[in-house]
Image (tube, rainbow, N blue to C red):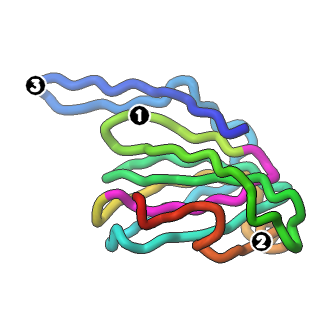
Amino acid sequence: MVTVIDGEIFRDHRGVIMSLNDFHLEGVERTYTIHHPDASVVRGWHGHQHERKWFHCIKGGFTMAFVQPDDWENPSPDLKPEIFHISDQKSQVLCVPAGYANCLKATEPGSILQVWSDKQLPVALLDSWRYPASNWVDWDQF
């Protein structure tokens, strides 16, 4: 199951501090950012049987969907996604265990997502599964 770690946002006359004090980087092997200049683009589906990921919105917002494929070669068209909305207005990390595929869409142009993974890129590339973005979610509603 995808879980959420809530952070904190502190605002005063000096500015804003966003923290994720309950998020621990144990097991993280790499990090990268995803920048979506166009909010109409749907990115995904992309999954890993053995890779864990964590997602944090650092600018704008995203609608994100996650499914657990029942058959990695030919997943059922009836899978029910878990859908989350994250934004830079709330400090959160989505924790995605191994065995999930994800798909996402920015909710505003210029949105940026920080991603952490527990696998180095060469290992992750050997466990990379892709499916059409039109699977499991009607992205026109977001």
* Residue at (31% x, 53% y) in the render: 60
Image quarter hosting the C terminus: bottom left
* Other residues around mark 1 within 10 Å, as few (<14) / some (14–19) / many (≥20): some
Q: Using the numbered discs, state the Cα–Cα distance from disc 3 to disc 1 in whole angstroms.
A: 19 Å
* Residue at (42% x, 29% y) in the render: 19
Amino acid of disc 2:
Trp
* Residue at (81% x, 64% y) in the render: 76
Residues in magenta? 97-107
SS class, disc 1:
loop
Looking at the rendered image, the disc whose residue lies closer to the viewer, 3 or 2, is: 2
- Which residue does the numbered mark 3 point to in the structure image? 13
Amino acid of disc 1:
Ser
- 101 magenta-colored: yes
Majority SS type along the magenta span:
strand
Q: Quadrant of residue 9?
A: top left
- 36 magenta-colored: no
SS class, disc 2:
strand
Residue 91: x %, y % from top left: 41, 34
* Other residues around mark 2 within 10 Å, as few (<14) / some (14–19) / many (≥20): some
Image quarter hosting the N terminus: top right
- The residue lying toward the viewer, choosing from 73 and 79, is 79
Amino acid of disc 3:
His
Residue 72: x %, y % from top left: 86, 66
Pick whichever of labels 3 and 2 is earlier in the sequence: 3
- Which residue does the numbered mark 2 point to in the structure image? 129
- Which residue does the numbered mark 1 point to in the structure image? 91
